[in-house]
Amino acid sequence: MALIDLFSIKKQYDIKLLLDNVDFHLNKGERVTIVGQNGCGKSTLMKLVMGTEEPTEGKRVMNSGLHIEMLSQQPVFEAHLSVREAILNELSELKKAKDDYDALSVKIAEDFENEDLLNRLEKASAFLDHHNAWNLDDKIERILQEFHLKAYEHRPVTSLSGGEQRRVALASLILKKPDVLLLDEPTNHLDVYMVEFLEEILLKENFTLLFISHDRYFIDSIASRVVEVDNCELISYHGGYISYLEQKEARMHSLKKGHDNLLRLLKQEEAWLSKGVRAREKRNQGRKKRVFDLRDEAKKNPTLIRKMMVELEREKKHFNREEGVSRKKLLFDLEDMSYAVPNKKLIENFTTRILQKDKIAIVGINGAGKSTLLKLMLGRIKPDSGIIQQGEFALGYFDQHREMLDDSKTLIETFCPDGGDQIDVQGVGYHVYGYLKSFLFPQEFLDKKVGLLSGGEKNRVALALLLAKKVDCLILDEPTNDLDIQTINILEEKLLNFSGAVLFVSHDRYFIDKIASKLFIFKGNGLVEESYQTYSEYLAVEKDMKALSLLEEENKNTEIKTQKSKVKIATKLSYKEQKDYDTLPELIETLERKIEEINTCLYDPKCYEDKGLMTLTEELQALEKDYEDKTDRYLEVLEIYESYQ
């Protein structure tokens, strides 16, 4: 059932056409994401659905009584409100409904046969049921905890960071439980743990969603349909992001096949037209027109197909995790480095080496010290203790604030400050337009001032400037912020082809998985862990560890009961079963420790010298086999034990 329909929509600003005769339908229970290049009309489409923007042509139809809420990219709050007050303020309608219900209940107690009062009470009850708003104070308390806002509840909301304010806005919207929830870049400024929580709560609450996001993992986890805005049209694909890529590839092949057929047909018609005299007869004018139409279509389609092929290949390309031939050049050598701010350790005794081919993602919760590490590497701040040694190499840095850009200059002045139209790209000469075209800038942008560009376009300029430099190491702070997916694909391609080291902070899980060969994980309280897992693998292990920790806590609570039951078991299990039940857990733990020790040792070249790689590998395989056998046996005995309970 469609909740909101857009029919024959055309949207135009002055001479810029964004949407041309498009239809869009949002059905109950759907989770639809809008994708497309920056400036293609994604936010405009969302505003048209919301009703805050009027179409140039066409109409919007919405179910009566539908409750819609929207999260904008920059939430606005009243300056004097605390975090708790800001959430309460957003829930004023629900609070009023509960107050009305309580007042009606008092009146009905005095006049319980009043039909009007009973009907009003029934409606109020249904409204509170729908929004699950019976215990607002309890719900606010829980949401403050879930969104990690409890510590800030009495602080002015406007004193919080952008990410914290975004969490306040999201918490308020989820408590409102609207019929339709519209989210514009909901994961911006959220750390990965908060993004995963947001995914869980959106799926659990079963919202009807329309959202814009550049976070491809978020799209794949949440979306039931992907709508692409392309060339003023809307193209719909069912499923998440991976399904979208597969269907887009099938569509591209279909277009290519259609174009090949068109060329064959055109060849036949051109041969007919070349016969001359008969083609000029009046009765053949329709066929002549068909030839000219085919020519126009043949000129148009190859551009579209080539564009789709390039974008799809960029997106589907798998990351080559081989380190490459030369890993000799040492860029940074960190030894026992520590850094703290008042009352908080950020980095404690961190030791590592960064080599020429390293691609390192710095990840972890917000405020743990990720950006601080970048500042230490750049030499902007000094460590409290320990050593940072830096080799002789050229360094390039990208920050979120685009400090290297001059808003008063045009693009051509920015890239060619000494005049002309040539730019040096890592030692190779390029025409400035040819280079900027690879960053999706059309020719007419060359004379456009930087100050007139959007945030995403400015980021593209800053990245293009940085990647033109001949450097050995790139340090990037949130490079994917404000970029559309196509631009992120281009950035990924250029970073994968970059011969030097890349050290970056990002919350984009897909981007991290594709680029990083190593992780620096900020665990909090100064602990920085180095890992060669992919980020997805690390998060999966982290999730399992949390579940295990909860299980261990539950086991502690039942320890006494378990001890008492051992006497009972002895009369049920055989002697060998009882012995295995008592001894195997400790043996399994010992094997786990030994396996972990060898795995750790495998990262240390000194181990290879002492024992030899083959010996270590064989020892590890034997331990893993023993661990598997003992675990299987323990589970078997445990099953027998549980059957007696």
Image: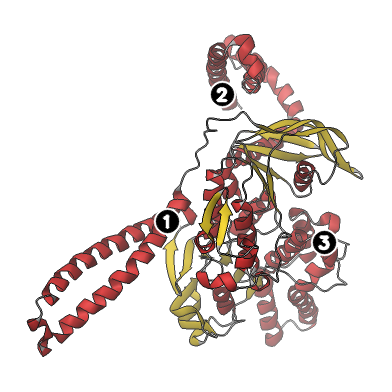
Q: Amino acid at mark 3?
A: Leu
**Which residue carries the number 2 mark?**
635
If you read the primary sequence from the N terminus, does the residue marked by circle 3 or circle 2 appear first? Answer: 3
Is 197 located above or below residue 615 in the figure? Answer: below
| Quadrant of the frame with the C terminus | top right
Q: Residue at image x 65%, y 14%?
A: 583
- Snapshot quadrant of residue 344: top right
Q: CA distance from mark 1 to mark 3?
A: 42 Å
Q: Amino acid at mark 2?
A: Leu
Front-lying residue, 430 or 500: 430
Q: Residue at image x 54%, y 44%?
A: 496
Q: CA distance from mark 2 to mark 1?
A: 52 Å
**Which residue carries the number 1 mark?**
310
- Crowding near pointer 2: few (<14 within 10 Å), some, many (20+)? few
Q: CA distance from mark 3 to mark 2?
A: 50 Å
Q: Is residue 44 left or right of residue 88?
A: left
Q: Residue at image x 59%, y 41%?
A: 516
Whether residue 360 is visible here, answered yes or no, is yes
For discs 2 and 1, the disc positioned in front in the rendered view: 1
Residue 413 rendering spot, x and y as whole percentages: 63, 67
Residue 53 rendering spot, x and y as whole percentages: 59, 82
Is 550 located above or below residue 5 in the figure? Answer: above
For discs 3 and 2, the disc positioned in front in the rendered view: 3
Return the mark for residue 64.
Answer: none
Mark 1 element type: helix
Is 122 located above or below residue 416 in the figure? Answer: below
Q: Is residue 301 left or right of residue 432?
A: left
Return the mark for residue 160.
Answer: 3
Q: Amino acid at mark 1?
A: Val
If you read the primary sequence from the N terminus, does the residue marked by circle 1 or circle 3 appear first? Answer: 3
- Crowding near pointer 3: few (<14 within 10 Å), some, many (20+)? some
Front-lying residue, 242 or 556: 242
